[in-house]
């Protein structure tokens, strides 16, 4: 059986469309399925729409969070509750083309354990959003050593891969990087991002920046190493300036140097504050991890079969 995990946040209009579209495509292809909708604490009628879809189609499963925990938590909740021999993850807005699931399923039947959805393009985006996305994936690719340039959450995983991901104990998770990091026999399917047919994007600039910072810190310690290199660079700069000052003093050409002193104080103070901020951010992440709180809380579950 194929389980399809569908994170949903304020997707009241899309739930019936997505459930009917996926059911029609998978059922028409003769693939036994379940559709696991995860309501990530929506503020509209998303949960009611999921319940209605479950009444109409016994293959629809609903999970309702007690509050908004984020997309990563929603995906892992779906992975942990999915019962299929393989599990796919797809966005509720259908910008991931659902017919590609059949192609992914065929590759899984051929023995592939991770089938990645790879973007051929990012669809219609503003220049600023495209630049920010490319910058983020360039940074995360460089920090992790994995090519994340065209990565997405749209993928299909074998049961052994799902079980491996579910055993990982960390609270802060980055699904698309972790599913790449675990390895296994991998294939890819290319697709073009589609326009959403209803509703609007839930990703604000602020949310995307927070998402980027959280995922970079959860998957790489490189920013902490940057603090060390900044310290080394400033030390070298200070030594060079110190030697120059001594030479001028011995030669009787010493200057007042008030401006230089002020600049040194400002630069060093700025570097110290930035470094403390990076270290503090990682300490906060450690604090969140050691508290051991659950990634999410499910307040209600709907499953007919």
Image: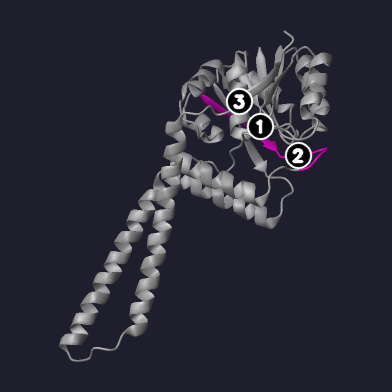
The residue most toward the left is: 250
186 is within the stretch colored magenta? yes
In which quadrant is the C terminus drawn? Answer: top right
Q: Residue at x 63, y 51 (%)?
A: 206
Q: Position of residue 196 (x, y in %)?
A: 79, 39
Residue range (magenta) = 185-200
Q: How many other residues sit within 10 Å of disc 1, few (<14), some (14-19) or many (≥20)? A: some
> Which of pointers 3 and 2 lies earlier in the amino acid sequence?
2
Q: Which residue is more in the foreground, 136 or 77?
A: 77
Q: Which mark is residue 194?
A: 2
Q: Position of residue 228 (x, y in %)?
A: 33, 54
Q: Residue at x 59, y 22 (%)?
A: 79
Tag 3 residue: 297
Q: Which residue is more in the foreground, 284 or 238?
A: 284
Q: Is residue 235 above or below residue 109?
A: below
Q: In this rendering, would 259 be left or right of 17?
A: left
Tag 1 residue: 67
Do the residues bearing badges 3 and 1 touch, measured as CB atoms within 8 Å?
A: yes
For the residues carrying marks 2 and 1, which lies nearer the camera in this image?
1
Calculate the distance from the C-alpha at mark 2 to the C-alpha at mark 1: 29 Å
Query: Under tag 3, what secondary structure?
Result: loop
In which quadrant is the N terminus drawn? Answer: top right
Q: Residue at x 64, y 23 (%)?
A: 298
Q: Is residue 177 above or below residue 163?
A: below
> Which of pointers 3 and 1 lies earlier in the amino acid sequence?
1
């Amino acid at each position: 059986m194929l389980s399809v995990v569908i994170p949903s946040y304020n997707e009241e209009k899309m739930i019936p469309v997505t459930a009917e579209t996926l059911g029609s495509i998978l059922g028409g292809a003769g693939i036994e399925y379940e559709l696991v909708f995860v309501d990530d604490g929506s503020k509209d009628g998303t949960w009611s729409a999921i319940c209605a879809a479950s009444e109409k189609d016994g293959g629809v499963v609903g999970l309702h969070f007690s509050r908004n925990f984020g997309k990563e938590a929603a995906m892992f909740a779906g992975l942990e509750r999915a019962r299929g021999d393989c599990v796919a993850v797809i966005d509720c807005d259908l910008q991931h083309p659902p017919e590609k699931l059949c192609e992914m399923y065929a590759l899984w039947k051929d023995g592939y354990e991770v089938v990645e959805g790879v973007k051929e393009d990012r669809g219609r985006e503003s220049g600023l959003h495209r630049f920010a996305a490319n910058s983020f994936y360039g940074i995360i690719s460089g920090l992790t050593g994995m090519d994340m340039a065209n990565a997405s959450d749209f993928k299909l995983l074998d049961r052994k891969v799902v079980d491996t991901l579910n055993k990982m104990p960390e609270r802060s998770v980055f699904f698309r990087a972790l599913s790449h990091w675990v390895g296994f026999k991998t294939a890819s399917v290319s697709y073009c991002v589609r326009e959403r047919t209803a509703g609007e994007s839930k990703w604000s600039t602020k949310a995307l920046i927070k998402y980027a910072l959280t995922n970079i810190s959860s998957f790489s310690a490189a920013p902490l190493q940057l603090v060390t290199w900044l310290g080394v660079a400033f030390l070298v700069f200070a030594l060079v300036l110190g030697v120059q000052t001594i030479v001028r003093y011995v030669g009787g050409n010493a200057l007042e140097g008030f401006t230089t002193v002020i600049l040194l104080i400002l630069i060093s103070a700025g570097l110290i504050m930035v470094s403390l901020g990076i270290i503090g951010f990682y300490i906060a992440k450690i604090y969140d991890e050691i508290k051991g709180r659950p990634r999410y809380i499910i307040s209600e579950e709907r499953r007919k079969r």
